[in-house]
Image (cartoon, coloured by chain):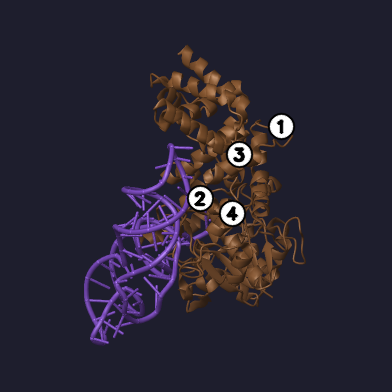
Chain colours: A brown, B purple
Amino acid sequence: MIRTRFAPSPTGYLHIGGVRTALFNWLYARRHGGRFVLRIDDTDASRNVDEALAPILAGFRWLGIDWDEGPEVGGDYGPYYQSQRGATYSAAVDGLLERGCAYRDYATPEELGEERAAAQEKKERFLYSRRWMAEDDDQAARFETEGRQGVVRLKMPREGSCQFTDLIRGEVEFDWAREQDHVVQRADGSCLYHLASAVDDHEMAISHVIRAEEHLSNTPRHIFIATSLGFELPEYAHLPYVAEPGSKTKLSKRKLDKYLKNAEFARIHEHGRRIAERTGHEIAADTFNPVIVDFYREVGYLPHALLNYLVLLGWSLDDKTEQFTIEEMIEHFSLERINSAPASFDPQKLMAFQDDHMQRLPLETRRELVLPYLRAAGLIGAQLPVQLDPILEAAGDRIKVAGDILDFDDFFVADKDLAYDDDAFEKRLGKPDDAAGILAGFRERLATHEDFRAEALEALMRSFVEEQGIKLGQIIHAVRVAATGKGVGFGMFETLEILGRERVLGRIDQALARLGDT
RNA sequence: GGCGCGUUCGUCUAGGGGUUAGGACGCCGGCCUCUCAAGCCGGUAACACGGGUUCAAAUCCCGUACGCGCUACCA
């Protein structure tokens, strides 16, 4: 049975790199009919775990990455919170002690610091002398009467090497003598991450540990703990890290604000901010950020687009396939085709996937996606406005993310609330001397024209243009600004048809009046 | 500093001894056109560097540079 896991710390947000790691674990489990486990690594977090975990679980739910065992769903290998597994870890530490693979150590931090400094002075690599190691209970007791505090350290081998096969990197070898005697249990009895991780992977019967590259160097430690306890080793696969756009620098959780200085991130962020401002979503500096999954959900990206983009960040099927349904991802995913070099996150390419997926959706689906944004922005009430479908039709691929509908708010606002783009107004109506006359002339034609469908309107305008001996550009842009307040938009005649005679005439009058005022 | 991992167009990647080094995003140009977007056509652009091995190296080996990680009583 293939069992994989993703083990997030409750940090309050779901990071894009974490999603990719989780996705690969999930796909691998699904590919092989296995189970995907979510385990919460909260060994040191004391406060507000639920609160900090909620956005992470919500993010996975939104993406459709479901877990077979873990928070909210339970499972046979629980509890799935490391904070609740202290007894298991303590027992493992006792086991290590009994087998002589760990020892009680009574060195103070200062004493350790001195040893370390001395080694550095001599330019030698530091290796703890084990001077305050308690050989037996008596010695431990003596140290304790001196007032020393004991921790448990791993008694790492000091010769030979640790060799293992990484499913992505191949054969890997580390000298045991380079490994420190790491602390696995503090004086207060609490246990540290590496111990917890190695023990849980075994206790939860994880068959494949697929995790970030940063853990490759930690693996000998995990292997030592596992083999010392007599555990069968899982398979290991270390994923390359995800880098910043246009760089090989690792994408880090701690530099959120720095990323906004990156031009590509800044543009994506700005686009999102424009939408969030109108929907009233809080633009929190620490979560409204293109390295956090929440950002994409708020703005109206499609989960599938994000997954399709992420699956190709470090993995590929061949030299050409880029579009995958979830089923196809599951069918084709393999560890062998994961790249071992880092991949940088490219928000522009993500947008290309988003655009592509969006345009494939049927109209009904796009309508449902867009409605919440119109409601949140206060542009429509509870009722579905009948003209929404034609608007979406006419908008075509101009709506890339669901929130983009707000760029076309002019269809939804009352005439008197129509906002004018000053530059466009000036260029198309203010500046040309004859603009008002031409617009007024066309208004007269519109007023008496029966057929208000796009085709008929186009014919009307073209004959008007010919008759007046003017260029199409002299009237069409003027009408656009008058009817929508904007200099750009979708097809003019579709726009007029959607607005209808009454609103078009009203808005032209309003624009002419505005023109007279200035 | 030591150890480990990595390095193909700006970015994601294919290719793993013989290829005009392929595709995608971006970018640039053209066409279309009522603006914008799209679409269509075309173009730009890469094997980090230096040594080997070989008839032949992007591909295998060694070294260098650079990046990242580990070297914590963080995860």
Q: Secondary structure at mark 2?
A: helix
Find residue A368 and report its horizontal and vertical position in percent: 68, 45
Badge 4 is on which residue?
A360
Query: Alpha-carbon distance for marks 1 and 4?
Result: 28 Å
Badge 2 is on which residue?
A351
Task: Give above or below for A455 relative to A116.
Answer: above
**Residue A391 shows which numbered tag?**
3
Q: Chain of mark 4?
A: A
Task: Give above or below for B53 relative to A391.
Answer: below
Q: Chain of mark 2?
A: A
Query: Alpha-carbon distance for marks 1 and 3?
Result: 17 Å
Q: Which label sits in the foreground, 1 or 3? A: 3
- Identify the amino acid type marked 1: Gly
Where residue B56 sits, quadrant-wise, is bottom left
- Identify the amino acid type marked 2: Met
- Identify the amino acid type marked 4: Arg
